[in-house]
Amino acid sequence: MKQDGEKLMSWNECKKLPWNLILLLGAGFALADGVQSSGLAEVMSKALEFLKNVPYLAIVPVVTLLCSIITEFITSNDATATLLVPLLYNIAKTMNVHPLLLMIPGGIATEFAFWLPTSTPSNVVGFATGHIEIKDMLKVGVPLKVAGIFVLSLLMPTLGSIVYGTNDGTQ
């Protein structure tokens, strides 16, 4: 137990932290905030107006796949959700569908971050122990991601629309 005024961490302990991964996660949050505050999210949603003619049942698997893949290669799942959920809201409004029908699968899909250490802070913690390699993460993560995308793409348009009451026409 720490005493009043005692340091939480010594400099030698601090040097052992995986700073490259910590900075990468922080950069993801900064990127998401920059896209929102600059108005880029609004510009992107206007550029996607062609989606208003796409059937909803076709767009959910695409949204789910894209949101789950972005977490692996571009930024962490938290930053991806921060970036994409408002964008999905605008896309849903453009398509004249209830916003939850895109926001929920998009938000949940960002949690399918199983492949790489940078995908989510919990992956960073596990990877930083040195006992887990990227090939191990891929071996388990790929089947989990595929199953998650399939189940979410199937459940949201069916059961999800009933649970969230998105069939009643209110937006």
Image (tube, grey):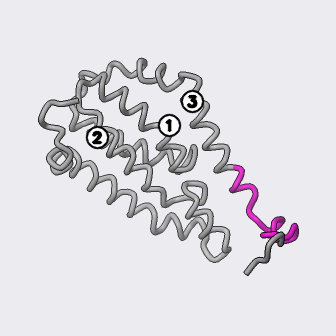
Q: Secondary structure at mark 1?
A: helix
| Magenta segment includes 1 | no
Q: Are marks 1 and 3 in contact (CB under 8 Å)?
A: yes
Q: Secondary structure at mark 2?
A: helix
Gap in angstroms between the C-alphas marked 2 and 1: 18 Å
| Residue 35 numbered tag | 3
Tell me which residue sits at (59%, 65%) in the image.
134
Q: Is residue 18 above or below residue 168?
A: below
Q: Residues within 10 Å of mark 3 (few under 14, many from 20)?
A: some
Gap in angstroms between the C-alphas marked 1 and 3: 7 Å
Circle 1: residue type: Leu
Q: Residues within 10 Å of mark 1 (few under 14, many from 20)?
A: many
Frontmost of labels 2 and 1 is: 1
Q: Is residue 15 above or below residue 85?
A: below
Residue 121 spot, x, y in % from top left: 58, 59
The C terminus lies in which quarter of the figure?
top left
Q: Nearer the viewer, residue 3 or 38?
A: 3
Circle 3: residue type: Val
Q: Which residues are magenta?
A: 7-23
Tell me which residue sits at (16%, 42%) in the image.
165
User: Which residue is under mark 1?
Assistant: 83
| Magenta segment includes 19 | yes
* Mark closest to the chain's N terminus, 1 or 3: 3
Tell me which residue sits at (33%, 52%) in the image.
149
* Mark closest to the chain's N terminus, 3 or 2: 3
User: Which residue is under mark 2?
Assistant: 60
Q: Are marks 3 and 2 in contact (CB under 8 Å)?
A: no
